[in-house]
Amino acid sequence: VQLQASGGGLVESGGSLRLSCTASGHIISINRMGWYRQAPGKQRELVASVTGRGSTEYSDIVKGRFTISRDNLKNTVNLQLNSLEPEDTAVYYCFSEVFAVGSSKWKNYWGQGTLVTVSS
C-alpha cells in the first residue's frame, strides 16, 4: 500500500491551499483517512480525519478553516485549507487505516509529507 500526497506550497497569510492524498495497492478496505502535521520543533498533531461513512474530526485549531473530504471510489482524501495563518506552517502527512490483501489486521499507512508554508 502506498499513499501519494500532493498540493503543498507557499501561500500568504489568509490564503488557501488544497491537499490531496491517494492510497493505492492491494487494498481490501479503508477505514479512517486523514492528515497530521508537524511543525519545526513540535510534535506531530492530528489535523483532521474522516471515516468511510463520512464522519469527520477536526483539531480545534483548524476547525472552521479547514475542510476534509473523501472520495471512496478513488481512495482519495482531500484537505481544503482556508484562512491560512503562519502558525499553520508545517509538513502535512496523510494517513489511511487500511485492511490490505494478505493482512490479518488494520494498519495505518503514511504518505511522504507535503510542506505547507504560510508567509506573514
Image: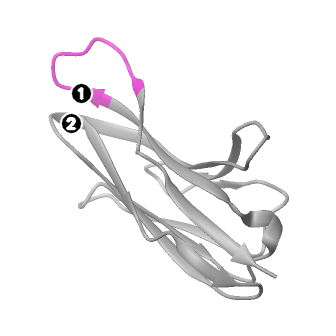
In the rendered structure, does residue 100 fall within the stretch colored magenta?
yes
Badge 1: residue crowd in 10 Å (few <14, some 14–19, many ≥20): some
Q: Amino acid at mark 2?
A: Ile
Task: Please tell me the numbered disc located at residue 100.
Answer: 1
| Quadrant for the C terminus in the image | bottom right
The quarter of the rendered structure image containing the N terminus is top left
Residue type at numbered disc 1: Ala
Is the residue 43 above or below the residue 93 in the image?
above
Q: Earlier in the sequence, mark 2 or mark 1?
A: 2
Mark 2 = which residue?
Answer: 27
SS assignment at label 2: strand
Q: Quadrant of residue 61?
A: bottom right
**Along the viewing direction, whichever of 10 and 93 lies nearer the viewer:** 10
Name of the residue lying farthest toward the top: 104
Depth check: give the residue in front, 104 or 35. 35
Q: Is residue 83 above or below residue 3?
A: below
Residue range corresponding to the magenta coloring: 99-107
The residue sitting at 28% across, 11% down in the picture is: 104
